[in-house]
């Protein structure tokens, strides 16, 4: 199996008025071709920063972040990013949003093919009826589907998703998870998903990286034993429940550690 | 015009009718000397007289052209300058105090200097109007541009956009709303400054007309001049709002 992305002894810290703040500390793991990695940990622990380094928005202070064997120098179309805030372009229609990446020089998509690619993803994401609408008319779930369609259209081999379904209601969220699994079946990709939902991580991922309270270190890496294609029946399996309580315990420990960090000393019990 | 449009038009008309009625009421109330307040119909009659015999259209044209040129030039410079200030934080730290210093100066206070340096011709008026529109426009531009969220630029980068593509396809569309707002603000300020600029020995123009009329105490002419300025400014603003609504259909707000 080829290594797609590697975190090699990666640390990241900021200089603040109160001294150095370590956000990520000595993190090493590989993401292989075809992996679906979920990174889970308490909020504010630095898991988004990890993704941000692989996306190319931030550079590690020490250590190396490699993609296809080369250090990440900046963002690029081979690493699609789905942002927590969606980031659909409000001044473009749904279809123009999907076409955006296709019109960029870096992606070399001939004008004749763009139409067909747009239509394919409009259909796949259930947005065909809204092709000419502006995002202001779309619901949160539809905006997120649009963001995914737009990222997919430029055919990245690798997808980075930062709590993509965090802002959605429970039903929409579970629909989006199923849609993501369905799409991955047909367009095999490597995925790194940042999430704070234990169920989401187990249901979607092939491997789960549990990170500690800030600074983010690796607490445990867990293989998820369910083969793809998966459907919701997976969630009824006893192994799912065992895995869930195990990971939930880890995350809760770290959450408490995080709370303790933030609490002033005089208030400690 | 459809039903809703008709109703909106009617609603917009009511305050005008109210203002005219109030005008008559003040005149007939006996509290003020009627010779100091010409009646609306007298002003209307004067308007047609000026229009047919005195070439009011030439004044309107002269003023509108000045405002138009002043705003066009002012905004033409304000857009790139405001953009740079909004985009590069160091540039703002560097230029902000100076811009606020000049912005605070009322254009009227500059008239004596403008006469000394630019004479009393068309150029002098243009300089005053340029000054007024540039400083009002540049503030709107840089406040707007500095609030553009980096998220869209990041998204474009992850899709493979290079610097030129980001500028053309992301930054320009995000800047257009601010340019339009700057234009609207500058237009308002420019009309307000017009009379001041035409105080500089202008031959024609609505400000000049008001200025000359005040010498001879022709109150009705002053009223005509004031109402013309207000109406033209209103029409220009309406046109600009139409253009804005057309260009910014994507914006999440209800306009006109």
Image: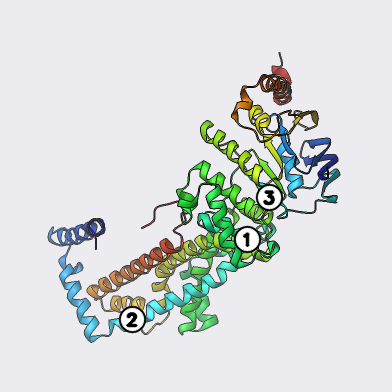
- B162 vs B80, nearest the viewer: B162
Where disc 2 sits, the SS reads helix
Chain letter of the residue carrying label 3: A
Res A80 label: 3
Q: Position of residue A261 (x, y in %)?
A: 74, 25
What quarter of the picture does the N terminus of chain B occupy?
bottom left
Q: Which residue sits at x=63%, y=45%?
A: A83
Q: Nearer the viewer, mark 3 or mark 2?
A: 3
**Residue lying farthest to the top in this orientation:** A269
Alpha-carbon distance for marks 3 and 2?
60 Å
Q: Position of residue A49 (x, y in %)?
A: 73, 41
> Which color mode does the image show?
rainbow
N-term-proximal mark, 3 vs 1: 3
Where disc 1 sits, the SS reads helix
Res A102 label: 1
Q: Are marks 3 and 1 on the same chain?
A: yes
Res A47 → quadrant: top right
Chain letter of the residue carrying label 1: A
Question: Circle 2 is placed at which residue position?
Answer: B59
Where disc 3 sits, the SS reads strand
Alpha-carbon distance for marks 3 and 1?
13 Å
Q: Circle 3: is it few (<14), some (14-19), or many (20+) Cα within 10 Å?
A: many
- In this rendering, would A32 be left or right of B68? right
């Amino acid at each position: 199996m080829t290594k797609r992305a590697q975190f090699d002894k990666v640390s990241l810290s900021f200089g603040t008025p109160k001294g150095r703040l370590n956000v990520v500390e000595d993190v090493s793991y590989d993401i292989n071709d075809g992996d679906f990695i979920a990174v889970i940990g308490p909020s504010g622990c630095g898991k988004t920063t990890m993704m941000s380094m692989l996306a190319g928005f931030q550079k590690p202070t020490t250590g190396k972040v490699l993609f296809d064997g080369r250090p990440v120098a900046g963002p690029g179309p081979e690493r699609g990013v789905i942002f927590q805030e969606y980031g659909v372009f409000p001044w473009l229609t749904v279809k123009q949003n999907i076409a955006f990446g296709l019109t960029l020089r870096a992606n070399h998509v001939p004008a004749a093919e763009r139409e067909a690619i747009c239509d394919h993803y409009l259909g796949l994401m259930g947005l065909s009826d809204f092709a000419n609408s502006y995002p202001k008319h779309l619901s949160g779930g539809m905006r997120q589907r649009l963001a995914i369609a737009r990222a997919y259209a430029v055919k990245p081999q690798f997808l980075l998703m930062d709590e993509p379904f965090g802002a959605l209601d429970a039903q929409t969220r579970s629909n989006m998870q199923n849609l993501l699994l369905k799409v991955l079946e047909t367009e095999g990709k490597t995925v790194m998903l940042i999430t704070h939902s234990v169920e989401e991580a187990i249901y979607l991922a092939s491997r789960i990286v549990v990170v500690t309270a800030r600074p983010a270190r690796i607490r445990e890496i867990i293989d998820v034993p369910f083969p793809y294609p998966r459907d919701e029946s997976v969630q009824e399996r006893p192994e799912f429940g065992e895995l869930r309580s195990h990971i939930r315990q880890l995350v809760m420990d770290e959450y408490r550690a995080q709370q303790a960090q933030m609490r002033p000393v005089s208030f400690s019990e | 015009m459809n039903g809703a449009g008709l109703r909106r038009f009617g609603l917009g008309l009511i305050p005008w009718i109210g203002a005219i009625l109030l005008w008559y009421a003040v005149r007939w109330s006996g509290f003020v000397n009627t010779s100091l307040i010409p009646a609306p119909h007298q002003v209307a009659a004067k308007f047609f007289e000026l229009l047919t015999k005195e070439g009011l259209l030439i004044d309107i044209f002269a003023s509108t052209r000045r405002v138009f040129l002043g705003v066009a030039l002012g905004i033409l410079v304000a857009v790139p300058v405001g953009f740079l200030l909004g985009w590069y934080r160091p540039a703002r730290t560097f230029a902000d105090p100076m811009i606020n210093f000049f912005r605070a100066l009322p254009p009227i206070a500059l008239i004596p200097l403008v006469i000394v340096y630019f004479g009393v011709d068309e150029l002098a008026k243009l300089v005053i109007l340029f000054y007024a529109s540039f400083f009002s426009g540049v503030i709107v531009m840089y406040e707007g541009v500095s609030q553009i969220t980096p998220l869209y630029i990041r998204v474009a980068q992850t899709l493979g956009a290079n610097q030129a593509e980001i500028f053309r396809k992301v930054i320009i569309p995000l800047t257009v709303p601010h340019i339009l707002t700057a234009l609207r603000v500058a237009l308002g300020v420019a009309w307000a400054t017009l009379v001041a600029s035409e105080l500089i020995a202008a031959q024609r123009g609505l400000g000049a007309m008001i200025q000359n009329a005040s010498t001879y105490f022709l109150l009705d002419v002053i009223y005509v001049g004031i109402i013309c300025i207000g109406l033209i400014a209103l029409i220009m603003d309406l046109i600009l709002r139409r253009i804005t609504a057309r260009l910014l259909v994507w914006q999440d707000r209800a306009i006109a």
